[in-house]
Image (cartoon, rainbow, N blue to C red):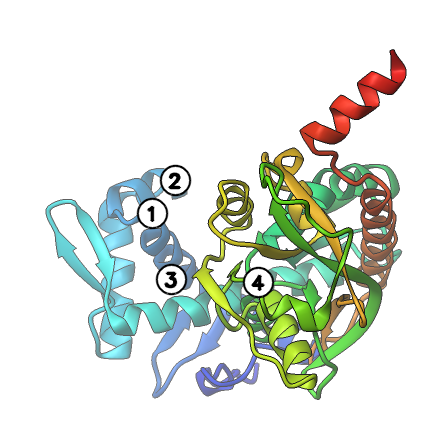
Amino acid sequence: MREIAATSFRADTPVILNPHEFAMICEYRISAIGSARLDLKQLEYFRHVAELGSFTNAAAFLSVGQPTLSRQIADLELEFGQDLFDRNGRGVVLTQAGCQLLEHTRGILMQVGRARQELETTRTGDAGHITLGLPSSLGNIVTVPLVKAFAKALPKSRLAFSEGLSAYILERLSVGRIDCALAYNATASEDFDVTPLLDDQLFLIASASRTKKFPASISLSELADYPLVIPGRPHANRMTVEHALSNIGRKIQIAHEVECIPAIVDLVRQGHGFGVLSLNAVKSSPWAAHVLIKPILNPTLMFPLSIVTSTRRPKSAFMRKAISLIGSVVRGEIGQSLGKMPRSPKDRQASNRRAR
């Protein structure tokens, strides 16, 4: 059997294999530099030791003897000619070389799993595993509906989630750590296929306890006069606001740079500045009913949300079905959330008076 050279897995490219390489990797052997062999089982052992931070814990999880596990890791370190772990009394930590190998290992093992999955269970497109990356502001809104939708439409599938900033999610997609992503302000490229889902509107967020009467809406130009509590770059929200203001010759005014959405809403609630957020982001906070939500007009600030996949990985029948289902659920849930504007305490009091 022809061996797949270890140099096929490079640090600067996603670990994407053709079907012939998939089939050979499924036989659990790849060759390393020279005549020695690098066993995929060694990589599996290495990954568990790295993630659990202990040979003892990894041996228990894998149901292997600790001497066997230690010997496999020692062989791996000998093969690469570098220490992969620093040992201490509390366990082990990765060296710089170990960190680099862990990133490659995760990609390699994920591709092996995908190879088995695609060869064995996805002929009809009804079974498989997909990892979806998405912004934290969407997690509270779409995670549960997606799990329910997959359980009903694709009961043999497995759906996993990875949350983070859109920019970081796309990095994970490019190296094969996730299968597809929900991302704001994504642009198509030679690495990414981008399918627009919807335009999410951005609103000005102000404290509901303000004594001064607040206008029903503000213009984009007026937004530059408000000190904002807003995420730092490269957060898609920040980039959208800065770019829009730059187009009309205005600059953003920063009160505080905060990435945590609930913390932004809480700071605004307490009067430490103003926010610019989408409605679903506000609703993900426990303080949603304690802030005012005002439209930004002339022009309206829109926040395009897309589903993004890698151009370097062919889409199986299951992947196409899963992506279609994700898009349908997300459109429905966010569209529904846009029709449910959180009400402030003053709004609720007025509604109660009318009811009486």
**Circles 1 and 2: CB atoms closer than 8 Å:** yes
**Circles 4 and 1: CB atoms closer than 8 Å:** no
Alpha-carbon distance for marks 3 and 1?
A: 15 Å
Residue on which disc 2 sits:
61
Depth-wise, is mark 2 or mark 4 nearer the camera? 4
At numbered mark 2, what does the secondary structure look like: helix, strand or loop?
helix
The numbered mark at residue 226 is: 4
Amino acid type at circle 3 is Gln
Q: Counting residues from the N terminus, which is met first, the one under dot 3 or under dot 2?
A: 3
Amino acid type at circle 2 is Phe
Q: From this viewpoint, is residue 17 visible?
A: no
Q: Residue at x 54, y 84 (%)?
A: 13
Question: Between residues 84 and 80, which one lies in front from this camera angle?
Answer: 84
Alpha-carbon distance for marks 4 and 3?
A: 56 Å
At numbered mark 3, what does the secondary structure look like: helix, strand or loop?
helix
At numbered mark 1, what does the secondary structure look like: helix, strand or loop?
helix
Depth-wise, is mark 4 or mark 1 nearer the camera? 4
35 to 160, vertically: above or below: below
Q: In which quarter of the image is residue 290?
A: top right
At numbered mark 4, what does the secondary structure look like: helix, strand or loop?
loop
